[in-house]
Image (cartoon, grey):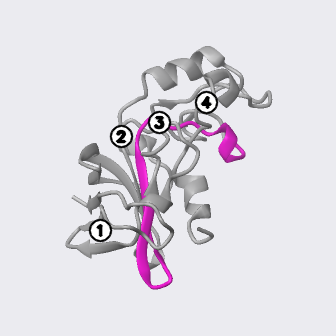
Amino acid sequence: MPLLLPLLLHAAPVALAGAGARDQAAFAPGPAPQALRPGVRRCDYGDDACIDRLIAHPPLLTPARLPRGARIGRCLLEIDGKRLIDGKCGYMISKGGDFHIFGPHQVFDGIDYPEAGGMANMISTDWWADVFRRDGRWAGYSNSEDGIRAVHGQESRWGALRRKGACYLSDGGKRMPEGPIAQYVRVCLWKR
């Protein structure tokens, strides 16, 4: 996981599972809200009502709201037959082909709400997934196990992934070396 931690901190805003908006928005007092990019306004530090609204009604994905280095594409995230992302999405690709995808209702620290300063203060409002190389094989995880607002993914149930075109697939249903039965996973990214 050390390879992906920097990517997660900047690309996958997430929050503690079960934490309320007030817990997630424990930001230090700071400057007034500002538009970081034309037409984009973020919640202010400590503005619990704004954070609650952001979680309840996240904005749609637009180029103006993307984090630096992110693009809009088309994605599929399917786990055990359940489609979590299917269509328009955001993505980031790292050197070596590792990538991060997020659904069209994701929010971002420093864009939609103040810089989080750590994962405990980050907010997630949509599904996301990471696919990366580890020990010469493809692996990955998402927030599918713990829900949209989860802090981290559940890599242990995916097992090794194999590439097929624009998709990465697991051998779901097989017992993994660690013991549990692997989930059926399909993660696809089309740049457009």
Q: Residue at x 61, y 54 (%)?
A: 9
Residue located beneath label 2 in the image: 62
Q: Looking at this view, is 43 or 180 the one in front?
A: 180
Q: CA distance from mark 1 to mark 2?
A: 34 Å
Name which quarter of the figure residue 92 lies in. bottom left
Q: Amino acid at mark 4?
A: Gln
Q: Looking at this view, is 99 or 84 the one in front?
A: 84
Q: Residue at x 43, y 28 (%)?
A: 58
Residue located beneath label 1 in the image: 171
Q: Amino acid at mark 3?
A: Pro
Residue 99 image point, x, y percent? 42, 65
Evaluate whether residue 86 shows in this view. Answer: no
**Badge 1 density bin: few <14, some 14–19, many ≥20, Cα 10 Å:** some
Left or right of residue 8, residue 97 in this image: left
The answer to whether mark 1 and mark 2 are in CB contact below 8 A is no
Outermost residue toward the bottom? 136
Q: CA distance from mark 2 to mark 4?
A: 18 Å
| Discs 2/3, front | 2
The answer to whether mark 4 and mark 1 are in CB contact below 8 A is no
Q: CA distance from mark 3 to mark 4?
A: 10 Å
Q: CA distance from mark 3 to mark 1?
A: 45 Å
Earlier sequence position, callout 2 versus callout 4:
4
Earlier sequence position, callout 4 versus callout 1:
4
Q: Tell how many labels.
A: 4
| Discs 3/1, front | 1
User: In the structure shown, which secondary structural element does the residue marked by tag 4 occupy?
Assistant: loop
Residue 66 image point, x, y percent? 44, 47
Residue 101 image point, x, y percent? 39, 54
Q: Amino acid at mark 1?
A: Asp
Q: Amino acid at mark 2?
A: Thr
